[in-house]
Image: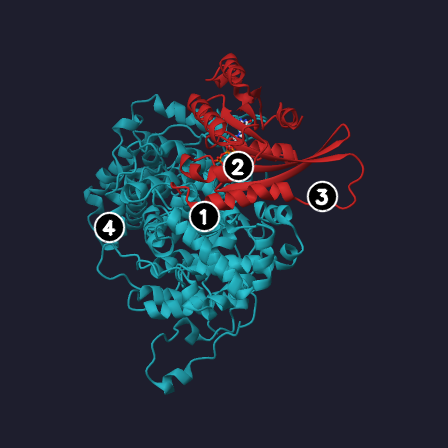
Chain colours: A red, B cyan
Amino acid sequence: MVAADEDRLAAADRMANRSGTAQRPNGSTQGKICQFKLVLLGESAVGKSSLVLRFVKGQFHEYQESTIGAAFLTQTICLDDTTVKFEIWDTAGQERYHSLAPMYYRGAQAAIVVYDITNQDTFGRAKTWVKELQRQASPNIVIALAGNKQDLANKRMVEFEEAQTYADENGLLFMETSAKTAMNVNEIFLAIGK
Amino acid sequence: MTVPHLKHPEMYFGAITFFAKQHKEDTCGSNGLPLTPNSIIIYGKAQILKTIKSPYLCQYLDIIRGKHERTVVVSQYCGQSLSNYLEKNTFTIEDIKRIAYQILTGLNELHKKNIIHRNLSSDNVLLLENNVKLFNYGLYYMTDNGKLVSFPIFLTNPKVDIWSLGIILVELTLNKHLWHSLKLGQRIRKILSLLQSNSSIFERIAREHNCYELYLEIPQEVKEIIELCLNVYPQNRPSCEELLQKEVFNSFTKPTEFNNKKLCQPFEIFTINELYHWWQLAGGDLIEGTVLGQERNPATLYDPRIVVMPLDTLYQRFENIPLECYYPLIQCKSDIIALAEPPPYDATGLPLIIKERDPEYQFHRVILFRRLLHGYPFTKDLIIKEAQKDIPPLLRGEIWATLLNIKSDYKKQYLRIDKFTPTATDRQIEVDIPRCHQYNELLSSAEGHKKLKRILKAWIYQNSQYVYWQGLDSLTAPFLYLNFNCEAKAFACLSHFVPKFLHKFFLKDNSAVIEEYLAKFSQLISFHDPELASHLYEINFYPQLFAIPWFLTLFSHVFPLYKILHLWDKVLLGDSSYSLHIGLSVLTQLRDRLLTSGFNECILLFSDLPEVDIEKCVIFSMGTFNSTPKKYNPPRTRK
Ligand SMILES: Nc1nc2c(ncn2[C@@H]2O[C@H](COP(=O)(O)OP(=O)(O)OP(=O)(O)O)[C@@H](O)[C@H]2O)c(=O)[nH]1
Ligand SMILES: [Mg+2]
């Protein structure tokens, strides 16, 4: 899956269109309904699937299976008088699956780029993702950076300040999260939703 | 009438049980995740014990995890313990020499495998006719030298077993239970007092038990052996090898006769493994057996009792199986002979799950397949023919290996491969393994993790044209699960499986083959179900979005193991296009919901795949596989 060929890009475009033409639920008169397409990116095993699972189902699976291709989940949240429907693409982290990513981030209104605070390499990979998004995704995409596994702060390899500075320089939302303890998980999704 | 056939004096089994050490609540590993329960580590470590086969060792049959970290260990248990005979029978010197020789031979095999019995006593040596078998020798090994349990086992030197042998020989020669009436503390004090003197320990024990006369009559060569064993300093005790060289044992045959490298192994119609399997299917209950041995000491978590299993239910259940069924005809030229065959046990039409749990049916299948496997490769066609009906779970690992054409030199091949040099892929493998089918006890055990890692590394090393794609771990899992005690075979299966069923999927650039499969898959849906195909097309629900893990891992990343096994039973009989038909049948099972759903509901269905009935899926996919024009299939791949 190295060469992102014509077919796949075409599929991506069709998907991107889809969110524009999505149907409204019947009789949606009370309040605004807002659909929100969001993608999670980041090195393998940093906890992307775990964050989504925590946000969507309030659960944490220690043996969370690895993601192949991508997984799709939704969650509906009421923010004041607006109903926000998150459509979340959780992607595969292994570098090899890279070429599939555009299919998911094209047309996304937001992205959460995740790294693992106990692993410096994953932070490097997160920066690469941010660059790619800035170059290739839709120009007004909202990007958040999540430093996950905050519960393992005693094994920290990436300093909070370092990540915060990087986020500020690049105009990213930034939080340290833990899918395990649920810390900042809802917060980061909601911060994006606003 | 054929029950006597089943009643082999060596084919009885018993169980022991103990509790693994519990982790303190809320303790986490360095990755912040809960620690693997000790009982799982034990479970994984104990598996290899099942492969030990020796006339002087009881064969391990099963390890079962119960609640609260309880472990039940089932093994052969035949005859009676030596302690049972003591003070009731007298043993001649010749008997004692033979027993000593047999215990030593058994111990020697264990020590060569770095297994220390640590628990050797006259309670754990079983005597059946003229043959002795050691029992419960794996406890120390499976608990990682006692680290995984809370009851006390110390010392790590194999020479402890030699001391124990000495004590058993003292008991036999004096025909006395030593210090029988003393409490544990008193016994320890006695033994410590022995260590302080310079005179012969054997002699002092004899005097203490008022057996000095008897002691004097014992032939010098036997005394010498006992004295050697009862040396206070472990380093001064001889090893098993050294003892076996002693002249006293010259009259016994040397162990070469059990050398399993013989040209031709005798064929056994069934072994204690099969008997145990049938017994379980016939409702055998490990809780029901007769309890032998001492009362459980409530102060420790070790329960010294042995539960011997009654086999009557099985005998009754198999009472009417005609003798001929033990010797099924597999190749028959004459109609007359063929007609004399008893009618086959009729299980047609029964669901697969029922067939797999029917003891009589499994009896017939296992007996037949054992014969066919024995005749492999000449019986390959027959194996395929029978496998099309169903595959008996007990023999699935071996049957799959023959269906995959594994050659007999697979062990040598595996040995030669570098599985240890670090590579750039290691990190990915290391983060994937602890997420791979971890609900399964074998795959989540420490041993399972190590094995999976070695197999994956070996595969990457061996296949330089391919790379590790996430998912290869899941693909390997069924093979490791089925061949847990033979990594080499698991590896060989994987190595034959990939080129046959997943050709090019593990190329660094696999986009072409994936696109091809996805395109063919779309065509296949259109061909068999135009209505569904156009609905999916209208809602932009493309196979790219959900089917990549299906085909890349042949559903092994999608379904739990027990479903994968049933699915792959058929995959192995098909070709590389069969996975498309499985995909079609999954869609078909969900058809009604898909047809009434929009994009989101459809994709959500596949993010969390609902119950798929695998038997239906298999029947349906075999149907479309056989009735679809070949142009809808991807090109045949390399054989
Ligand atoms: N201690 C701790 N472990 C976590 C946390 N989040 C995830 N994990 C663990 O980290 C491992 C990887 O998590 P996943 O959610 O599968 O990671 P992923 O980013 O989706 O990985 P890929 O699917 O391979 O890209 C799992 O074993 C999780 O249980 C966390 O916040 N704290
Ligand atoms: Mg994931």
Is label 1 in a helix, a strand or a loop? helix
The circle on residue B255 is: 4
Pick whichever of labels 1 and 3 is earlier in the sequence: 1
Q: Is residue B567 visible?
A: no
Q: In this orientation, which residue lies closer to the viewer: B295 or A148?
A: A148
Q: Amino acid at mark 2?
A: Arg
Which amino acid type is shown beneath numbered disc 3?
A: Arg
Say above or below: B440 vs A105.
Answer: below
Mark number displayed over residue A106:
2
Res. A7 mark: 1
Q: Is residue B206 left or right of residue A114?
A: left
Chain letter for mark 4: B
Query: Residue B15 location in percent, x, y?
Result: 50, 48
Instruction: Calculate the distance from the C-alpha at mark 2 to the C-alpha at mark 1.
Output: 15 Å
* Labels 3 and 4 in the same subunit: no
Q: Earlier in the sequence, mark 2 or mark 3?
A: 3
Q: Tell me the quarter of the picture where residue A3 sits.
A: top left
